Image: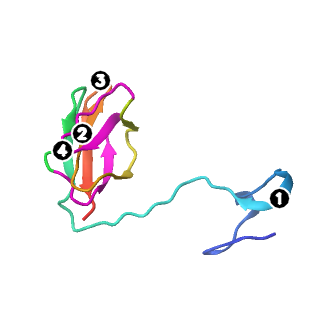
Amino acid sequence: MTLANDSGLMSRSRMATTDHPEIAGLQIPRVSTIQASLQIGAGGTTVPLSISGTSAPTTNAIASGAAVIYLTEPAFVRAGATPVAVANGTDQPIPAETLLRIEFTPGHKLAFITAGGTGTAYITPDV
């Protein structure tokens, strides 16, 4: 079986063979990266927020209920009308240096807390 991608045929080096009994020998594409698209605006919408071992909420609510975030330090995040993030594992952990698109209830704020380090959360609300 041969699979095609947007630029033509996939090479054998990008293929894997499965041993699953129902589909044994089937050639399937290897997935080595995740691709995502971001809508890039005119700029000026990203808000930097200092984060540390104390919960830091965004000043304004995010009307769209979605944002792209980038953290310079691993942190935990909580969404809510008046959120207070905690670093005990009950809030969502977010890794550092990873661009993520997150969704939450429209009109809520986000709060971030680190496990002890300091850094910056860059928050770009969807418009």
- Residue that badge 4 annotates: 58
Marks 4/3: CA–CA distance: 19 Å
Position of 51 compared to 73: left or right? left
Instruction: Please tell me which residue lies in front, 21 or 33.
Output: 21
- Residue 73 in view, yes or no: no
Name the front one of labels 3 and 1: 1
Instruction: State which region is magenta.
Output: 61-89
**Does label 2 or label 3 sit earlier along the sequence?**
2
**Is label 4 in contact with label 2 (beta carbons under 8 Å)?**
yes
Q: Position of residue 98 (x, y in %)?
A: 40, 45
Whether residue 53 is in magenta: the answer is no
| Circle 4 Cα neighbour tier, 10 Å, few/some/many (<14 / 14–19 / ≥20) | many
Please tell me whether residue 99 is drawn above or below residue 9 in the rendered image: above
The three-letter code of the residue at mark 3 reads Gly
Which label is found at residue 116?
3
**Does label 4 or label 2 sit earlier along the sequence?**
4
- Residue that badge 1 annotates: 23
Whether residue 62 is in magenta: the answer is yes
Marks 3/1: CA–CA distance: 49 Å
**Does label 4 or label 3 sit earlier along the sequence?**
4
Position of 41 compared to 99: left or right? left
Please tell me whether residue 32 is drawn above or below residue 78 in the rendered image: below
Residue that protrudes farthest toward the left in the picture: 59
The three-letter code of the residue at mark 4 reads Thr
Which quadrant holds the N terminus? bottom right
**Does label 4 or label 1 sit earlier along the sequence?**
1
Instruction: Please tell me which residue lies in front, 104 or 35.
Output: 104
